[in-house]
Image (spheres, grey):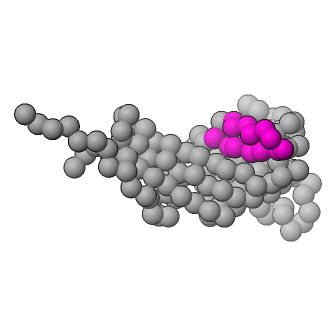
């Protein structure tokens, strides 16, 4: 009679983590203020060692402007014990079309990347034109874990 074996859990390399970040475009952004932690789904693009997202002004932005240290998570799930998860801790930088000249290239680059994700971004056909802020998250710390039942 075969014996079921439990999952093997291992740490992922930085390269594995970046490959997972590259393959996906939906993650979760966690941020905190005082004693409250919030987590929100957000579309993103990973490029050049940065996570680029787009958002609009509101509670999330006001909170992050107060404390720009965030966590960001992306998962790949194939089964209950077959998954990969990446967690990034980093600082958020907000960019707009009227950012200082030193940040204009980063804003334009972010818009270009996000346009590849959502056609129409930054144009008259933009499906979410109210999202005027580009967020860049620096990958200060990156960790990943994976579980597998395969031999």
Q: Quadrant location of residue 33?
A: top right
Q: Residue at x 45, y 52 (%)?
A: 145
- Picture coordinates of residue 27 (x, y %)? 60, 42
- Picture coordinates of residue 1 (x, y %)? 7, 34
Q: Quadrant location of residue 137?
A: bottom right
- Picture coordinates of residue 128 (x, y %)? 76, 32
In front here: 49 or 12? 12
Q: Is residue 96 visible?
A: yes
Q: Is residue 119 visible?
A: no
Give yes or no for residue 33 being in the magenta stretch: yes
Give yes or no for residue 96 being in the magenta stretch: no
The vertical placement of 134 against 58, above or below, is below
For the view shown, which residue lies furthest in the bottom direction?
102
Q: Residue at x 83, y 52 (%)?
A: 67
Q: Residue at x 72, y 51 (%)?
A: 70
Residue stretch in magenta: 28-40
The vertical placement of 20 against 4, above or below, is below
- Picture coordinates of residue 88 (x, y %)? 61, 55
Q: Residue at x 73, y 31 (%)?
A: 127
138 displayed left or right of 142? right
The vertical placement of 111 against 28, above or below, is below
31 displayed left or right of 78? right
């Amino acid at each position: 009679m075969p014996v079921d074996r439990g999952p093997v859990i291992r740490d992922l390399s930085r390269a594995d983590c970046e490959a997972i970040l590259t393959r996906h475009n939906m993650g979760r952004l966690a941020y905190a203020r005082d004693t409250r932690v919030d987590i929100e789904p957000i579309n993103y693009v990973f490029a050049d060692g940065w996570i680029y997202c787009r958002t609009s002004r509101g509670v999330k932005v006001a909170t992050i402007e107060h404390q720009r240290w965030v966590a960001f998570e992306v998962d790949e799930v194939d089964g209950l014990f077959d998954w990969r998860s990446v967690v990034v801790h980093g600082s958020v930088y907000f960019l707009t079309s009227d950012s200082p000249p030193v940040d204009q290239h980063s804003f334009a680059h972010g818009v270009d990347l996000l346009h590849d994700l959502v056609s129409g971004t930054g144009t008259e056909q933009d499906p979410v034109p109210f999202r005027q802020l580009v967020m860049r998250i620096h990958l200060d710390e990156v960790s990943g874990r994976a579980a597998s039942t395969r031999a």
